[in-house]
Amino acid sequence: MEAVNRRDLLRGAGSAVFGHSSRRLRQLDKHRNLFTGDSCVYFYNPELWQPEGLPYTARAIHRYVDLLADSGVDTFLSNPNAQVAWYPSKRLETILDGYRRGDRDFFRAHARATHVPPEQLDAFLDNMVRFHNLYLDLAEAGVDWLAETVKACRRRQIAPWVSVRMNDTHGVEDAASHFNCKAFRDPANRLGGRAIDPADPPNAHWVALNYARKPVRDFMFSHIREYLENYGFEGLELDWLRDPHILEPGATEADCRLVTSWLKDVRAFADSRARITGKPLPLGLRIPANLGYLRSRGLDVQAIVRDGLVDFIGFSNFWQTSWDIPYEQLRAELGPDVVFHGVVEDAPNWIPGHAPDMASNTGQAPYPNPGVRYMSASAPMLRANAAGKLSMGVHGIEQFNFFCTDQVKIPGLRADYGALRGIHDLSALRGKEKHYCLSSPSGRLSMLWETPEQIPAVIEPRNRREFRLTMCDEQAGGTLRVQVALENPPGATRLGLSLNGAWPTFESRQTRDMLFPAGPYTRFAAPVTAWEFKFDSSVIRQGWNFVTVLNNSRNPAGAVKVVSVELGVSFA
């Protein structure tokens, strides 16, 4: 049996971008179009995956994996855990422990944890019963949906990988929530939830598992052991974006060594499984691009990479996708011996859209995030986000939260799985419609570790502001439309725009129409108006592009507030 040389495998993976050469490149080249499905991916929309009705069966799982395979996905990362297992584990606590069909009271602690308003409690409990009954349907029929996932992947020749949430916080605001493990119910195993400002009280949502505690490290290792030993997953991603709470803030060098040592044990176990199977078992991280923040919480990514403990890293924001990650800076900090994946999340930004025929725009309809655009409903947005990352040399594209578009069940909003085909191939993306954006403030707790946003930005009269994002170059003859979206623009606003330092143009039109629709959302919501400029597509550079907005108002009170900068590429 051929020995598994992980270092050769690692170098091979990066050879296309960083100059390494190895026949191991062919092995990692099979993992370029990655799709992550969380522990509920089959269960959010049973009407789509088993339209013939209930009880739920394994057919739903196979139909979903068939759709991924038909859409060109080569690697499916199953996320089977929050704190506890969401599958019928034989070793670990599970989400169904103690639940009996129809038991609404089972979910009251989680309602408290998630601050469900009293007037919505009954609907919440009924929905939780319906949702968990789907898992119970499978369990009572003797179907292990996680094992069935691996089976379906192998039937369709998709690589089955596992993505482990390292510190999920969905239920942490009430220790009795069924989302939480027994270890978490011991206060000694919890972080303190310290706020950013010492003058502020602790944040209850940041009271997560404390990796300084051996029971916590042992518990999470038991997850990993089961996935690799009992289910035979062929790749392992440690998801520290859910959530990047590891140790108390201000971790020392000795603290970081504790976590790194634990990761060495994980690496050794993965290598032992690779020796048994005779196949490489890639190990990687999904993390924010803020390495300084991670180190302050105990995860020293530079030391982890320097010690050869991981093969790949996917950098991302939390739920809003990234458009401007400085991959070249991260490469300089981490060196050539780790593969980068670009992660595409499901929200382009938090700029609200307007769907003229949808009641949720009034805020009265019972939809989550009314007005938020969902990227997986927009092929141009998906292509643009992937192309910008590929232009910076990432090895592959990993989709995350793609299925959330269907989950919300908004009329006219559906995920476009067909858009995934070729999403990892920059040459295939050139010449196709694209819709680039910038990230905006999320207002969520995750904004601390996300890439700092460039918008909103106030530009005073006779001043300018530069914005940057990554794009792929295009052939001549196409049209590039650049929209500068302003909130409550003052009268007689006069904007100019320069691309990549060129002579500015002041020729524009005002519009509320978005560049491309995202499902039912076709217009910016009031009070936003966009100034739209046109260029030939050949002006786009490969990699970083710079958009300079000039406010040439002669009115001293003519400051403008830029809430979005969006760029659309189209071809006749």
Image: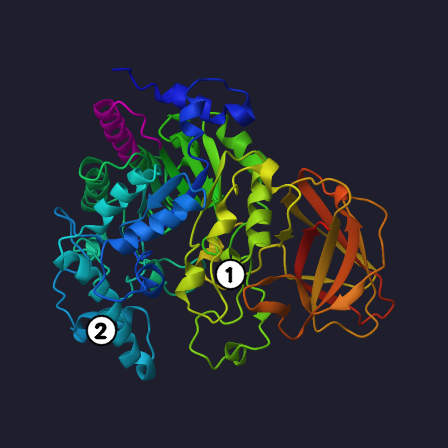
Vertical comparison of 460 with 275: above or below: below
SS at mark 1?
Answer: loop
Residue 547: image x %, image y %? 73, 50
Going by the numbered disc 1, the residue's amino acid type is: Tyr
Numbered tag placed on residue 374 in the rendering: 1
Q: Is residue 177 visible?
A: no
| Spatial separation of the CA atoms under disc 2 and disc 1 | 30 Å
Going by the numbered disc 2, the residue's amino acid type is: Arg
Q: Is residue 69 magenta?
A: no
Residue 276: image x %, image y %? 21, 24
Q: Is residue 570 visible?
A: yes
Q: To which residue does mark 2 refer?
A: 108
Vertical comparison of 14 with 40: above or below: above
Dominant SS of magenta comes to helix
Could you tell me which residue is drawn at 44 percent across and 54 percent down?
402
Residue 352: image x %, image y %? 57, 68
Front: mark 2 or 1: 1
Quarter of the image where one finds residue 133:
bottom left
User: Looking at the image, is mark 2 or mark 1 earlier in the sequence?
Assistant: 2
Compared across the picture, whether 415 is left or right of 251 comes to right
SS at mark 2?
Answer: helix
Per the rendered image, the range of residues in magenta is 261-282
The quarter of the rendered structure image containing the N terminus is top left
Residue 434: image x %, image y %? 63, 50
Could you tell me which residue is drawn at 60 percent across and 53 percent down?
380
Quarter of the image where one finds residue 263:
top left
